[in-house]
Structure formats: C-alpha cells, structure tokens
Image (cartoon, helix red, strand yellow):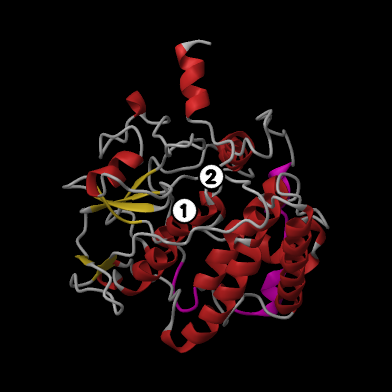
Amino acid sequence: MSEKTSAVEEHSTRGAYVTGGEFTRDTNYIEDRITRDGTPGPNGEPGWPVEPGRYRLIAARACPWANRTVIVRRLLGLEDVISLGQPGPTHDARSWTFDLDPGGKDPVLGIERLQEAFFRRFPDYPRGITVPAIVDIPSGEVVTNNYPQITLDFSTEWTEFHRTGAPQLYPEHLREEIDQVNKRVFTEVNNGVYRCGFAGSQEAYDAAYARLWNAMDWLEERLTGQRYLVGNSITEADVRLFTTLARFDAVYHGHFKCNRNKLSEMPALWAYARDLFQTPGFGDTIDFVQIKQHYYIVHEDINPTKIVPAGPDPSGWLTAHGRESLGGSPFGKGTPPGPVKAGEEVAAVHGAA
C-alpha cells in the first residue's frame, strides 16, 4: 500500500454517517454571537462586535446549511462587509479543504483546511468541523458555526450595513410564525432527508421516510394557495426550505432514498422552488455539479464507489412557474440584489443555464 493510499484510508469517512439505527444530528455548535455592540447573547452566549471587514464566512457551495448563509448575505447586501471563502465540494474525515483556491489555501486566512481555524481557538475541538463557519480574520480563530443563528444575526445585528432596499427576512410581526414553520421544516425536511439517507436499519428508514413525506405533503398543501411560506414576501423560512428543495431531485431522491416521488412531480412545491430559484440571490448561488460531487463522493457509507451520476437535467429550474398569480412580492417593499460579486459566480456549466 502506498503512503498516499494509506493516508486516504486513515482519513476515510466510512462509518462517520451510518452508525446503526436512527441518524441523530449533533446540534451542539459554537454558540458565540456577533452582535451590534459585542454584548453577549440573551442566554449568555459570548459576544463579538459587528465590524466590517473583520470576519470571513466559510461556506461550501455544496452544503445546504452553508448555502443559507450565502443567500442571506447576498439578499442583504453584506458581500463587501463579510468576505466569503468557499471550500471545495469534498472532504475527508478531517475537514473541508480549500482545494479550489490557488495553492490549495484560502487566500485570506492562508489555511489549507477549515479545521486549522477551529484548532487555533480550541486545540482539542472534539466535534465535526462544519460549514458554515465564521472566522475572525485577525486571529484566524473560528467564531461560530451555529448556522441557524448566523443568518438571523445577519438580519438583525448587521442592519447598519444592509444595502438600500434589503428585504425584511425576519420581521418582528412574523417571527413567531416563522419560528414555528422553521422548526417543522428543520426536523422533518431539512434534517428529515438525512435521517432517511443515513438510517442504519430498515425500521429507522421507514419511520424517517414517513415523517419526511408527511411534511412534504403539508408543504404542498400550504403552498398551493400562497406564494411564500410566511407572509407575502420572502422570509428566513423560504431560505431554509429552498436549499433542501434545490438538492432534492439531484441528490436526496436517489442517494438518500427519498424516492416516493421527485420534487418535479409535486405541482405547488416544484413551482414554488422554481419561483425562488429564478429570484436573484437564490438560483445564482446553486452549483449542481459541486452539490452532486459532495454527496456522492464524501458519503462512502452509502456510495462506496464514489460514482457521481450524470443527471438529472437542471434546465427545468428555468421554466415558467406561474406563481405571480398568487400575489405577493419577493422583496416586499425592498428591491432585488445586484449582480453576483465578482469572483463569487457559479460556473456557467454548473448551474441551470
């Protein structure tokens, strides 16, 4: 066995995802908050001050949780305030790598692996090295990887630096309903597809499958008569659902065995997903090639051959959706974001064009 082969085997992801029985996600993240004045969060979470140019968002295109932060950052116009580092689509058991950057290093942080930023702050960090993560550029230390809170803080703590016309993604009068919808979408759909894919027994899979499709049917019914999940414009709830829907037919339907039907066979959900995809800030963040490479190559437990499928054809994402007839306006009283920041564009052959 060669030295290179030995290293690959040593850091294989086999056994990291399917461990037997029901899949349970570790949701213990670094809970530090970036707040407008650096004060701690309401539950005592350590606070870091909002400061333009100080932080770097590390968000792989392939990851749905990271994709959320890229969308919200773009919708709110924070591109020039919080820089973006994007690891490649694959990783081993150690962490995400910056293999797409020149020299294999993040051009701002100068690191090859995201784990370096975690270890600089927590030398014995015991959990998975996850994206999205926000890194403090001066120290090179990770600040937080608590992805549900990151996007909410973008909306509520960075308001001084929002672009003119930025939408209200987490308006106070809708927060209770948004939180309720988000809770069900996370447990049953966002994480529900993973419970199907990483089930370690037939019983665990059957239960996860039933829960997923019960929720998908609920969403289909809810979105038949309204354009967006909550209110008359895009909110945090739509961002969170969209990143799962964007990966459904390309990955979850086959790879995760979520195959009762395709997203494209659900009239309301498919039209809703296309409506968002065609809205600036959503589809222009989706890289179908990297998405498929990540899931099919990294998850050795369920795809040991690492063969990446050629399909499906993504051009359907650009077909007419007809959702305008339901009323509402994507950005409410706001305006669409401008063009994608130079250097952050999805390669033409990787999107739906």
Residue 212 located left or right of residue 103: right
* In the image, residue 228 lies in the stretch drawn in magenta: no
* Residue that label 1 marks: 66
Residues marked 1 and 2 touching at CB (< 8 Å): yes
Q: Nearer the viewer, residue 305 or 164?
A: 305
Considering the whole magenta stretch, tell me its main secondary structure: loop
Q: Position of residue 284 (x, y in %)?
A: 53, 50
Question: What residue lies at 29% left-to-right and 72% top-to-bottom?
Answer: 157
Real-space Cα separation, disc 1 to disc 2, in angstroms: 8 Å
* Residue that label 2 marks: 62
Q: Nearer the viewer, residue 333 or 245?
A: 245
The mark found on residue 211 in the picture is none
* In the image, residue 316 lies in the stretch drawn in magenta: yes
Residue 342 located left or right of residue 47: right
Q: Quadrant of residue 75?
A: bottom left
Identify whether 140 is placed above or below 21: above
Question: What residue lies at 65% left-to-right and 38% top-to-bottom?
Answer: 301
State the extent of the magenta-drawn residues as a range.
313-335
Q: How many marks?
A: 2
What is the secondary structure assignment of the residue under circle 1? helix
**Which amino acid, by three-letter code, is at mark 2?**
Ala
On the question of residue 96 being in view, the answer is yes
Report the residue that reaches farthest toward the front: 20
